Amino acid sequence: MNLKNLISIIVIYAFCVIAWIVLGGVTFARTNESSFALKNSVINLYGDNLVINHPYLVYITQEIKTSKNRDGYTTSELINIENPILPEKSNVLINITLDPRKKGVLWFPTFKAEYVASYEFNISGYKDKNIFLRSELSSTDSIYKNVEISINDNKLNDIRFLVNKEKLEIEKSNEKVTLKIGYNTTGLEKFNYNITPYHNDIAQIDAFKLNINTDFHNIDFIDKTMSPTRKNSNHNGWELMWELDKSITGKDIGIIIPGKPNPGDIIPRAVFAAPFSLLFYFMIIIVISIITKEKIHPINYFFLGCAFFSFHLMYSYFSDHINIYFAFLISSIVSIFLVSSYLKLFASSKLAFIYSPVAQIIYLVVFSYSFFYKGFSGLIITIISVLSLFFIMQLTGKIDWHKIFNEEE
């Protein structure tokens, strides 16, 4: 090894980095182009984010609104104001089951939801008012099946007011109004239960109980929503419970639905991290070649870099057609075979079949596989990098670098 060879290896490494940047950009662009169109197609079939709004009653009051026009004249008009009446008791059960759908080359986190609820309103203080029910279906793209609504145990056959987002007048024969509602529907990516009438107000919540049962464990909550007051894990998933009484809040309830690993999310990140893999691999091979006095020419490093690049190239395009884990396995085996079968032609068997495969497994396979674990890939890569740096420093601490770079090959 001399300075000229080292500079040549650095130049080769730089070209490999450029190739990965191009591949990462192409992969990212392919994903974005197809994702938007495919997601719209999925929304048309299964609906968008599922939103269930807490039903409430309203009574109408009127007030005079004055305003000035451009000529400075004051005008007045009588407007209707809707005043909400929230339930004094709520008991809601929602079962969420994963039903992921593949569209094109992407998996989408679609799900099924079963909603059954009963609400009790106290209208004793509104006998002189006309009372109306406000309850609506949030998405025009979703399909709502087995819709059942009853008021004071009287089943409603005409439920068009739900679809048209209209008010339904309530008979005031009792001081209590009991509403029971249930249906099955589908959604995509997120589930929201909006407690407050206008979704961004502060309201007092009394005797509120919501149970959500899931068939998945990878649970996460939407930002600025309430965490459950209790949760129990079982072999199927989670039982999440929100129990509020005499509480004041402006927050709603929201769950992020987990999805299957998508090539378009994982592969670009693995590609952009590939230069770190090759950097550590080259460092290991250079150090071992110096210690064992192996003769490895910069051109050999060029082909080793190409073999590393082949992993990400195959991984990217194979994942369009086969399972992402299977694509990862095939790409790993082929890349390791390319490197080992090439090294055996000019290097020792130990380097070809022991040192190099171990380095590839650590810096190529493990590095890339870490991106399946969202949120942990950076930690895994950092730990491996620091341990590798320690290993290389200990291995090379006694090498006379002056002698290495001054000797002629």
Image: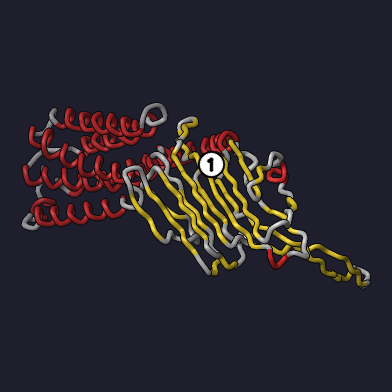
Residue at screen point 80% across, 62% down = 80
Q: Quadrant of residue 264?
A: top left
Residue at figure coordinates x 62%, y 62% from the top left: 86
Residue 389 percent across, percent down from the top left: 18, 55
Residue 267 horizontal side relative to residue 126, left or right:
left
Kind of residue at badge 1: Gly
In the foreground, 124 or 229: 124
> Which color scheme does this rendered protein use?
secondary structure
Q: Is residue 284 above or below residue 201?
A: above
The answer to which of 207 and 336 lies nearer the viewer is: 207
Relative placement, left or right, of 202 versus 380 is right
Residue in the picture at 28% in, 48% down: 276
Q: Quadrant of residue 196?
A: bottom right
**272 and 180: which one is in front?**
180
Q: Position of residue 219 (x, y in %)?
A: 40, 50
Q: Residue furthest front?
A: 173
Image quarter (top left, top right, bottom left or bottom right) of the N terminus: top left
* Residue at the image position 11 percent from the left and 37 percent from the top: 354
Q: On the image, numbered disc 1 is attached to which residue? A: 187
Badge 1 marks a residue whose secondary structure is strand
Q: Quadrant of the C terminus?
A: top left
> Left or right: where does residue 4 sit relative to residue 137?
left
Is residue 236 in view?
yes
Left/right of residue 308 with respect to residue 359 in the rendered view: right
Q: Position of residue 260 (x, y in %)?
A: 40, 39
Q: Quadrant of residue 200?
A: bottom right
Q: Residues within 10 Å of mark 1 (few under 14, many from 20)?
A: many
- Residue 14 visible to an observer of this rendering: no
